[in-house]
Amino acid sequence: MIFDPSLNIVTLVSIGEHPLSGRPRRAEQDARALELGLKLVADNLQVLYIGQAKSPATVSVLKDYLGMGLGQIQVLDVPPQADISNTLLENFKANCPDIILTGGRAENGESSGMIPYLLAEQLNIPIVTSITDIVSIDMLTGLAEVLQALPRGQRRKIKVSLPFVASVDMAAPAPRQSAYGCAMRGQLVVKDFNQSIDDVGQRHWQVNSAQMRPKRLKIVKAKTAADRFKAATAKIQGGSGKVIYDSKESAQEIFKLLRDEEML
Amino acid sequence: MSFAEFLPQLLPILILLGLVLAVIGALRRILLWRQGQESTIHWAGLFSIPQRYLVDLHHVVASDKYISNTHVATAGGFVLTALLVILIYLFDVATNILNYALLASSGLMFVGAVFVLMRRINPPPNLSLGPWSRLPYSLLIFSSSFFVLTLPASGLLPIDSGSWLLAILLVVGIIWGVGEMFFGLTWGGPMKHAFAGALHLGLHRRQDRFGGGRSTGLISIDLEKDKLGVEKPEDFKWSQLLSFDACVECGRCEKACPAFAAGQPLNPKKIIQDMVVGMAGGNTAKFAGSAYPGVELGSHKGGAVIPIVDVLLEANTLWSCTTCRACVQECPMMIEHVDAIVDMRRFETMEKGKTPGKGAEVLDNLNTTDNPNGHAPSSRMNWAADQNLAVFGSDVDRADVLLWIGDAAFDMRNQRTLRAMITLLRAAKVDFAVLGDCECDSGDLARRLGDEATFQRLAKTNIATMSQFEFKHIVTADPHAFHCLKNEYADFGGHYDVYHHTGFFADLVKNGKIKLNTNNAISLTYHDPCYLGRYNGEYDAPRYLLEAMGINVKEMERSKSKSRCCGGGGGAAVTDIPGKQRIPDMRMDDANSTGAEIVAVACPGCSQMLEGVVEPRPQVKDIAELMLDALCEEVV
Ligand code: SF4
Ligand code: SF4
């Protein structure tokens, strides 16, 4: 534990899905968010799951999270048609934590990656995305310093005021091993959440399984190993980009790009 | 008072004192063992102690004739001498026959002790020094004192011969001798091995090991327990604590241990001695043998209720072990090092979540994809796309043979072996089928990494899958799967007739179902896989097959039960604990020194480890591949 134990940190976890076997597992980003939370406040970390508490997949994966050394996980049991973000919001409105840690997006389901944004917007607090670490928190000024992951292993240090929402990047330290014994002994504290709000929008949706998206072919121009190394490590040299403030002008620019790419 | 009157009065007191102290010590020691957890007490085994000593123990010791003869003389002499001394000098049953018998037995013991002493003139590094260097002198003093004492009584010397000086010398000798041999027997001297060793032979946790039997499967644990695995010495079974006390610090295990030789921080002898320290409390400074390579001696301490890892020994010590069982095979006291190591690993993995190296990743993969490298379960049969195999469930429901593929399915090197095996089975017209994508990893790796939960899940899944189909035998090229299916699935209701491919092919060759070319003048040596050889006693079938191909096997110095591990077992390749050299390199050196051009293997793990050695080196070929080369196509 490196921070004030009175700090109220909540990590949200979800049920992940292995990309090859399709089996439920700890979601990789959520597990990293949990690892970060444990590093910051150890036993004082609160872990929250919202979903169908009784499904066997849920129980087995939550146990995997418990195996990381948690005493308990709070489970908000909601029906499948519930709107997760609104329900979460109800939960946090009364008692907003200092920091809410989440993964970037779920590994299955809608996987829109919107939860952290919606929470931040509705709670009216800042959001930092793709963080790898929280390096310091000054309780007096209420400012935290976080590291944000950028491409190619670069990091950006950002100051953000408490309370805030942070989504954790895959570049954050890998989660610790889940130990079977702790997993079996940890508690799932299930709360029936009867104020859950139905996701009205979803009612009329049709769900199809996703199609593999075509990938743009990468043409390697490098002839030598040194060139390839440079291509893999060098910073992208921007330059062709422009900053456009006028909305009409930017729409025009997007339109042009889509046309160039023969998408329109 | 003369010499003749003084001694007879003092002697019974000394002997009685020695015996009483020995009994008190014994009770104390038993209390130490009872700190351990409950386990079945095999009372009947106590009656077999003499037989087990003479047959099973000596079977191990006899590989070194010098010490086995020495031990028979010394130990036999001592037991007789002790009994006679008690009869004659404590109970005063003095007949001439008894006196002569005592002369003979103490003489025998003396001769034995002389050989013990000679052995220690230039002791090999695996022998412990310290109190163990004192022991031969104590043996000499004990035997000679009673010999001299009995001379006058036997009438070979006049009764009042000798002087006060001799009397005093005798008294000192007897105090020393009785002290070491009676008091030290139960108070932690080197002679403790006789007391604890005898009980351990009788009450051994694996009774099946005696009388030519074998018991090598790991013992399963109840996953509902409050604590999984061993954290503190008191978490061992009492019978394990007893077994640690039986160690004679002979260092045969140390000499055989591949990890020790590679300079990894492991020495099986020291692990056992550390457990003794843990059980009795104290520090490791008194240990008079070789340290764990790279770990300073005497910097650790222990107690029955003090956690072992990080206090008594370092975690890397546990994770260096390849579970090759060479130590267990060599141990004259039948101590089970691998059981103890895996017990402690279980706590590290299942309670602390601290499997080192790639361990955590591999266990995660096993749980999400049923194979250690995280390949898509649906790609398990990709290697056999051109093989047209019958798959249980989709093509057939019964076959004579279930061919167990194992994780070699995902490894390009070992797919060659699998292909060879299939051609051979077809040549012999064997009716076989595979489980296809439904097969899961056998659980061997998970179990040896201490993840009993994952092992049990995999075992139960495989058993449930196999229960849907009808087959007579299972055949596999992987000795690890072979061992699990044969010896470790029974605990979960899986009873099968399992063959390793070498055993199965040997039968086919014997029955004329496979005809092999006999003029293969290749220069070849054979590497015995631990899980085929020491774990399952199969040394002959692979050699039979090689000979059937007309190959004259150039045996390595360390072969059969003394074979040196390839370094890949027990998850050692996954935890990858650094040492001074790599185990497979050492094994390749063994092979090189035979001058062979090919190393025949019979395990996908061995072929990976040995092929990982940099060239130039002998070629590595599985026996199935060699057989394929030598297969006579039958022209009908
Ligand atoms: S099983 Fe093998 S590696 Fe492990 S301690 Fe024994 S001899 Fe050494
Ligand atoms: S454990 Fe066995 S082989 Fe090793 S030193 Fe002790 S008695 Fe000898």
Image (spheres, coloured by chain):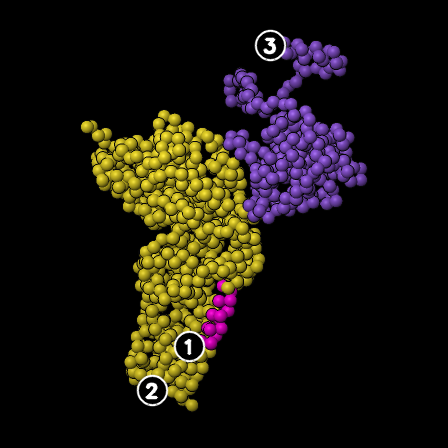
Chain colours: A purple, B yellow
Query: Residue drawn 40% across and 69% down?
Result: B137
Residue B329: x and y, percent? 37, 53
Judged by depth in the image, the label closer to the viewer, 3 or 2, is 3
Which label sits on residue B174?
1
**Residue at the disc numbered 2:** B159
Residue B168: x and y, percent? 43, 81
**Residue at the disc numbered 3:** A262
Which corner quadrant holds the N terminus of chain B? bottom left
Asked whether disc 3 touches disc 2, contact meaning CB atoms under 8 Å apart, the reply is no
**Eyeballing the image, is B515 above or below B534?**
above
Residue B504: x and y, percent? 30, 40
Q: Residue A88's quadrant in the figure?
A: top right
Tell if the residue under mark 3 belongs to the same chain as the one under mark 2.
no
Which corner quadrant holds the C terminus of chain B? top left
User: Which residue is situated farthest in the left direction here?
Assistant: B636
Q: CA separation, marks 3 and 1?
A: 105 Å
Query: Residue drawn 62% across and 28% down?
Result: A111
Q: Is residue B264 left or right of residue A258?
A: left
Mark 3 C-beta closer than 8 Å to ligand 1:
no
Q: Amino acid at mark 3?
A: Glu
Judged by depth in the image, the label closer to the viewer, 3 or 1, is 3
**Eyeballing the image, is B158 above or below B395?**
below
Look at the image and give the residue range highlighted in magenta: B19-33
Please give the chain letter of the residue carrying mark 2. Answer: B
The stretch drawn in magenta includes residue B236: no
Q: Amino acid at mark 1?
A: Ile
The stretch drawn in magenta includes residue B25: yes
- Residue A12 in view, yes or no: yes
Question: Alpha-carbon neighbours of circle 3 within 10 Å: few (<14), some, or many (≥20)?
Answer: few
Q: CA separation, marks 1 and 2?
A: 19 Å
